């Protein structure tokens, strides 16, 4: 049976920043309260410092401060996991210990970065220990529940996720892994889901690609989530899932085809723009105050702004009250009221 945390809808939280890209501490508090003060809170969880939260571009002090703020606001009302990343394994273990010392409920582990040997050219099927050794070191240092971020070199069979054999091998080696983030193409998702259901049924299938959620729910292949789409589409996403759970297929279809599908398909259409679009959509909704992520990540284009605005409205989602002024502030000439 899956761990209780693996049945929760974890948000891969964005990092609210000011225009100069310094931490927006008040913004982090407001963003955290947005999740706390909604029906989502009874079923949700927060992941602070995931990839969507710019963990690769944060200093050690910023990582700790972001965790501190979220934990202060949450005050044990829902689980908080910390994304942990550092360029070397020794630094990573230290960062992982720091997160535990601050009081997180679990860790969100991310594959190594840096040299081509362990990133773009890594063969995770032949050399799973590239990541497994790192997870083992983290696990030994904190002994906390683990959610995974299993990204690897793209493949026709799995998309950007790790192979089934590697997933099973890693889960077998680390009993503290309670959920596997499903960062896969649709066919890859099905393969991984079946492999884990057969070999490690207690490991939760954590839905990630929100444009697949309708099909994932239909096939009973989603136990919880680790997903950044909650940052901008919480209300219809939760209603859609609850309609499925209640057996109201007509309602689920109406929500899905009433704008939610179109929004999610656009956000996920280009993996190289995914987190940029998460950020843009959340900014258009008024949930964060900076529409851009830290460079070298690029800012949204004008076409992305106008497209996202239209799709949010089609999905029935409110946008920020000061939209016209904010569009001008960031150099976008858009007739917001005419969209």
Image (tube, rainbow, N blue to C red):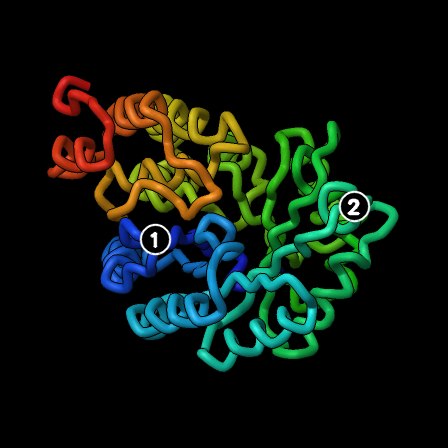
Which quadrant holds residue 271?
top right
* Residue 246 x/y as whole percent: 39, 41
Alpha carbons under labels 2 and 1: distance apart:
32 Å
Q: Nearer the viewer, residue 6 or 295?
A: 295
| Residue at 66 percent of width and 68 percent of height | 176
Sequence-wise, the earlier of marks 2 and 1 is 1
Which quadrant holds residue 250?
top left
Residue 297, labelled with which disc? none
| Residue at 50 percent of width and 57 percent of height | 55
Which quadrant holds residue 85?
bottom right
Q: Where 330 sits versus 24, above or below?
A: above
The residue sitting at the right extreme is 126
* Residue 280 x/y as whole percent: 33, 37
Q: Where 2 sits versus 324, above or below?
A: below
**Relative to 312, is 178 on the left or the right?**
right
| Quarter in which the C terminus is drawn | top left
Q: Secondary structure at mark 2?
A: loop
**Relative to 106, is 13 on the left or the right?**
left
Residue 122, labelled with which disc? 2
Q: Where 241 sits versus 93, above or below?
A: above
Q: Secondary structure at mark 1?
A: loop
Whether residue 9 is visible to the viewer of this picture, yes or no, is: no
| Residue at 28 percent of width and 55 percent of height | 31
């Amino acid at each position: 049976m899956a761990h209780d945390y693996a049945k929760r809808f974890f948000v891969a939280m964005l990092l609210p920043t000011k225009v100069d890209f310094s931490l927006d501490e008040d913004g982090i508090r407001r963003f955290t309260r947005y999740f706390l003060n909604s029906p989502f809170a009874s079923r949700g969880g927060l992941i602070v410092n995931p990839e969507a939260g710019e963990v690769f571009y944060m200093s050690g002090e910023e990582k700790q401060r972001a965790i501190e703020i979220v934990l202060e606001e949450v005050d044990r009302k829902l689980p908080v996991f910390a994304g942990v990343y550092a360029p070397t394994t020794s630094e990573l273990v230290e960062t992982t210990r720091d997160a535990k010392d601050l009081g997180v409920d679990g860790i969100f582990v991310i594959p190594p970065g840096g040299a081509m040997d362990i990133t773009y050219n890594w063969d995770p099927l032949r050399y799973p220990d590239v990541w497994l050794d790192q997870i083992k070191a983290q696990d030994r240092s904190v002994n906390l529940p683990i959610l995974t971020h299993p990204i690897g070199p793209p493949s026709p069979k799995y998309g950007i996720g790790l192979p089934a054999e590697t997933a099973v091998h890693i889960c077998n080696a680390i009993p503290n892994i309670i959920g596997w983030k499903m960062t896969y193409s649709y066919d890859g998702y099905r393969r991984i889901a079946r492999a884990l259901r057969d070999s490690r049924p207690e490991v939760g299938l954590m839905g990630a690609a929100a444009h697949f959620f309708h099909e994932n729910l239909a096939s009973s292949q989603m136990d919880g989530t680790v997903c950044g789409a909650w940052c901008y589409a919480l209300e219809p996403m939760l209603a859609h899932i609850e309609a499925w759970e209640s057996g109201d297929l007509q309602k689920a279809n109406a929500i899905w085809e009433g704008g939610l599908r179109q929004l999610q398909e656009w956000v996920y259409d280009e993996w190289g723009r995914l987190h940029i679009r998460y950020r843009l959509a959340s900014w258009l909704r008024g949930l964060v105050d900076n529409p851009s992520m830290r460079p070298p990540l690029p800012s949204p284009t004008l076409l992305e702004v106008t497209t996202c605005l239209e799709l949010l409205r089609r999905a029935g989602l409110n946008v920020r009250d000061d939209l016209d002024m904010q569009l001008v502030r960031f150099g976008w000439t858009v007739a917001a009221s005419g969209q």
